[in-house]
Image (cartoon, helix red, strand yellow):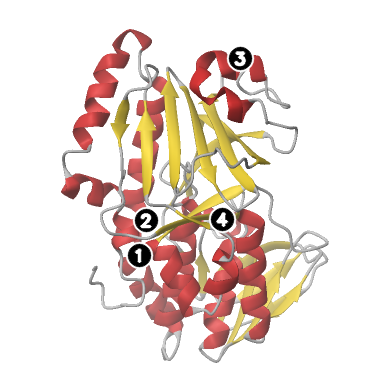
């Protein structure tokens, strides 16, 4: 069986490695001149870690990363609202995004995947043809569109339902790590519509994310307006002072699709279900859906029928994760300043319900190795 994959990012490479390990011949098309991943740090929850283990990328991906014992949330008065946020017995590592991407590429290459750069895809056909900017067409048993929010594969097949600008976003940065910095835990502070996350990502670096509404002009500046952010978060001044111009603010989008598949074509990752990264699961669910896709189609006599089964298995988990991530952003970004104490009470109350937190982070509790539809 032969697969063509549009997109050499996290979703595409995960799917490629998983398919190749099942005996498929796989070719990945990356539009850029080289494989690269833009970003700083990244959360790897249990579901993503299980995928890394299954495709032989785990050791390289987490080497030198930080095992998180809990995720802490504090409000504008520095009151502790949550400790161990959404953990409930799941593993959580924070690592460098570039390291994750490299480990996935290496796993794919070891499995025999062919990766072609400067290869621009313009669409696909339901019967399994991938279309290219230079007029070429290539046929495969399976086409996978992992080509991002503005997916040419998705758009060419009329699968797009809507692409929504969520009117908020985040700047992602790496700063030097000091011996006095937080270790083994991630910190998130809220003040009005602004949030700052402090995430140890390696022995030398801390991942700092600074989130704000799209209409927060000072918050969106790059390089960051350190004085403005320090005023909002004086307790984090030692971290904010270390910010350099090594990142940028980018807005968040939601992608909703009528379906994730048609004929022999599947779309995954941001192409199918882009979401705000508020739960740290954007990459995780992309890896999960790509891995499960490989398990379901491998050995299937009827690929289109297998894709129907795959979407039925994975869509409820992803839709719930996207919904709660969107809700998290609304609470964190658009809450009226006059009622911030009410917000703090609400977030504090959420910590009292382990079952609710498990629902919010349903992806982390999904058994990605079980394609029967059961969850752990």
Is 241 on the left-hand or right-hand side of 357?
A: right
Q: Can residue 106 be seen in this view?
A: yes
**Residue lying at 34% horizontally and 58% vertically, measured from the top left:** 363
Q: Real-space Cα distance between discs 3 and 2?
A: 36 Å
Q: Residue 228, which numbered label?
A: 3
Q: Real-space Cα distance between discs 2 and 4?
A: 22 Å
Query: Which badge, 1 or 4, comes first in the chain's sequence?
Result: 4
Taking depth in this image into account, of 223 and 134 the one nearest to the observer is 223
Tally the marks: 4
Which x, y percent locates residue 147? 62, 59
Q: Real-space Cα distance between discs 1 and 4?
A: 25 Å
Foreground tag (1 vs 4): 4
* Residue at the spot of label 1: 314
Mark 3 Cα-neighbour bin, 10 Å: few <14, some 14–19, many ≥20 = few
SS for dot 2 = helix
Q: Is residue 125 visible?
A: no
Looking at the image, residue 320 lies above or below residue 118: above
Given contact means CB atoms under 8 Å apart, are the residues at marks 2 and 4 in contact?
Answer: no
Which x, y percent locates residue 107? 62, 78
Extreme-top residue of the structure: 338
Looking at the image, residue 244 lies above or below residue 276: above
**Residue lying at 68% horizontally and 31% vertically, measured from the top left:** 243
* Residue at the spot of label 4: 95
* Residue at the spot of label 2: 318
**Residue lying at 44% horizontally and 52% vertically, measured from the top left:** 281
């Amino acid at each position: 069986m032969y697969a063509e994959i549009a997109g050499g990012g996290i979703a595409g490479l995960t799917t490629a490695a998983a398919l190749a390990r099942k005996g498929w011949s796989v070719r990945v098309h990356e539009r850029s001149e080289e494989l690269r991943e833009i970003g700083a740090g990244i959360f790897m929850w249990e579901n993503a870690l299980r995928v890394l283990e299954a495709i032989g990328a785990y050791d390289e991906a987490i080497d030198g990363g930080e095992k998180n014992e809990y995720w802490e949330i504090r409000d504008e008065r520095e009151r502790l609202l949550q400790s161990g946020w959404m953990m409930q017995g799941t593993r959580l590592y924070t690592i460098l995004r570039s390291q994750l991407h490299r480990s996935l590429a290496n796993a794919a290459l070891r499995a025999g995947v062919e990766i072609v750069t400067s290869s621009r895809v313009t669409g696909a056909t339901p019967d399994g043809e991938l279309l290219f900017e230079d007029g070429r067409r290539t046929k495969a048993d399976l086409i996978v569109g992992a080509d991002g929010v503005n997916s040419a594969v998705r758009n060419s097949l009329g699968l797009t339902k809507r692409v929504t600008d969520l009117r908020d976003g985040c700047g992602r940065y790496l700063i030097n790590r000091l011996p006095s910095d937080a270790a083994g835990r991630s910190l998130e502070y809220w003040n009005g519509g602004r949030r700052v996350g402090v995430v140890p990502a390696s022995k030398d670096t801390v991942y700092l994310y600074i989130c704000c509404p799209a209409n927060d002009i000072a918050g969106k500046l790059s390089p960051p307006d350190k004085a403005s952010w320090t005023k909002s978060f004086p307790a984090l001044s030692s971290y904010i002072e270390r910010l350099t111009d090594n990142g940028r603010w980018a807005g968040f989008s939601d992608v909703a699709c009528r379906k994730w598949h048609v004929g022999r074509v599947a779309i995954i990752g941001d192409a199918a279900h882009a979401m705000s990264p508020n739960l740290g699961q954007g990459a995780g669910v992309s890896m999960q859906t790509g891995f499960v896709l490989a398990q379901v189609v491998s050995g299937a006599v009827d690929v289109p029928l297998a894709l129907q089964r795959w979407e039925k298995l994975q869509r409820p988990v992803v839709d719930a994760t996207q919904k709660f991530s969107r809700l998290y952003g609304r609470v964190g970004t658009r809450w009226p300043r006059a009622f911030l104490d009410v917000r703090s009470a609400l977030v504090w109350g959420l910590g009292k319900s382990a079952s609710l937190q498990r629902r919010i982070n349903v992806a982390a509790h999904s058994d990605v190795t079980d394609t029967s539809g059961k969850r752990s």
